[in-house]
Amino acid sequence: MVEKKIPKATARRLPLYYRYLRFLYEAGKERISSAKLSEAVKVDSATIRRDFSYFGALGKRGYGYDVEALMNFFSKTLNQDRLTNVALIGVGNLGQALLNYNFRRNNNIRISAGFDVKDELIGTIHQGVPIYSIDEMVEQLDLQQIDVAILTVPSEIAQDMADRLVEGGVKGIMNFTPIRVTVPKHIRVHNVDLTNELQTLIYFINYYQDMENADDSDDTLNDFII
């Protein structure tokens, strides 16, 4: 792994680059320029070149980037050759959807254990994933050496579940609840609030629509003034 500290924004884009490079490789593409890569992943070429520069000379001037070599480099950087088992905490509607999906396009990520409080779910297997009681969570996380968990429980128990995940030794939590859980500094939490994201999208749609309408009105007024 590269010793230089990589900016968080760059780190967030690495899986995006890897997935597209893998797509290109499977399609038989041998090389690609930063301009073409920029067009495909919707990241400007200057940002791509800066992101890549943190890892040394990955391309050649006048040639671009070797797709296979770059894909393999990011595969190693992202530990794509190592399977990461993930725990799902809460097997409700969203949890069921995640079980059905279970990262099917990724060979290195797998939900390997689910946890819930419902008696009708405990002891069953969904999409090949065993469902355990919440009471067994700390023990199973340790036994299965699970470092990452997805939290899809009701808001009122989110913090309690987060506390148990910390006790079970997880290093990262993907939090789908609207609650911002409190964890020790060495635990990484990524918050995914679908409602918030949708409301933000709607706001921007309406805001920019209003801005465009205002601009149109100004143009019409200027026509009269002229």
Image: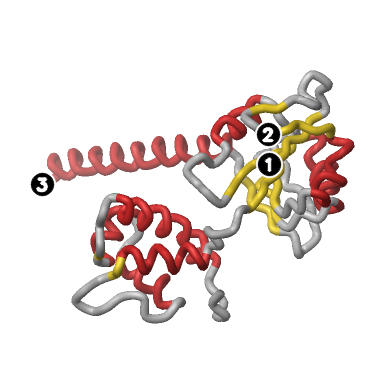
- Decide which of 35, 26 is in the foreground and name it: 26
Q: Nearer the viewer, mark 3 or mark 2?
A: 2
Q: Quadrant of residue 56?
A: bottom left
Amino acid, disc 2: Val
Density class for disc 2 (Cα within 10 Å; few <14, some 14-19, many ≥20) is: some
Q: What's the amino acid at mark 1?
A: Ser
Q: Quadrant of the N terminus?
A: bottom right
Q: What's the CA distance linking mark 1 and mark 2?
A: 6 Å
Residue 129, labelled with which disc? 2
User: Mark 1 highlights which residue?
Assistant: 112
Q: Kindly state the secondary structure of the residue where label 3 is placed.
A: loop
- Horizontal side of 181 relative to 39 (left or right) equals right
Tell whether 131 sits left or right of 215.
Answer: right
Q: Is residue 121 in view from this perspective?
A: yes
Question: Callout 1: helix, strand or loop?
Answer: strand
Which label sits on residue 226? Answer: 3
Q: Position of residue 198 (x, y in %)?
A: 51, 36
Mark 3 surroundings: few (<14), some (14-19) or many (≥20) residues within 10 A: few
Residue at 81% over, 42% down? 161
**10 Å neighbourhood of mark 1: few (<14), some, or many (≥20)?**
some
